[in-house]
Image (cartoon, rainbow, N blue to C red):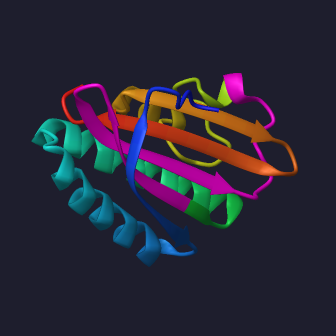
Amino acid sequence: MMPTSTIKVKAVETNAIGDEQDVVHLVNLVRKQAGFTGMTLLNLTKLMTATSELARNMLNYAGGGSVTIELVSRGKQTGLRLTFIDQGPGIANLEQAMQDGYSTSMGLGLGLPGAKRLSSEFYIESIVGQGTTVAIIKWANG
């Protein structure tokens, strides 16, 4: 799991993702919550893009799941931590799934590695037959 020992959580909200409308609602909610961190426009755009990619992956490959949004701080940094949890089929080969260009569908294969690049911190765990958890942090200025 993503290290949490030095991170303080100030607010938590969990949202179900079951259809495309839930993804749109989530991205809008993340935009609103990021406003409390003083996040730069560039970092906000990166966070919203990563959020959209990960939520759509969860919807397309696992049929949905839940996303927890946390307003977090570490020292003088503030940001958002998003945790995407599904009970889908899991990812058999995480190393392969994290490579640019790899896709099990007709996509570009940029979802997981792209989300990792857009995030300040990235964690993924997947168990075949049980599901996948992806946690990202985007710091306001990092």
In front: 79, or 122? 79
Is residue 5 among what the camera can see? yes
Report whether 21 appears left or right of 17.
left
Q: Predominant secondary structure in magenta?
A: strand
Q: Quadrant of residue 137?
A: top left
At 74% from the left and 39% from the top, the residue drawn is: 126
Which picture quadrant has residue 1? top right
Residue 20: horizontal and vertical position, in percent?
46, 73
Describe residue 108's horizontal placement relative to residue 41 as left or right: right
User: What residue is rendered at 36% in x and 72% in y?
Assistant: 25
Give the magenta part as a residue range. Answer: 67-95
Which is more toward the observer, 123 or 21?
123
Residue 10 in picture, x, y percent from top left: 36, 50
Q: Is residue 136 left or right of residue 126?
A: left
Residue 102 x, y percent position in the rendering? 61, 31
Describe residue 91's horizontal placement relative to residue 140 as left or right: right
Q: Position of residue 58 (x, y in %)?
A: 60, 56
Q: Quadrant of the C terminus?
A: top left
**Does the segment drawn in magenta span residue 45?**
no
Does residue 81 belong to the magenta stretch?
Answer: yes
- Residue drawn 12% across and 38% down? 40
In the image, residue 63 above or below residue 44: below
Is residue 111 visible in this depiction of the protein?
Answer: no
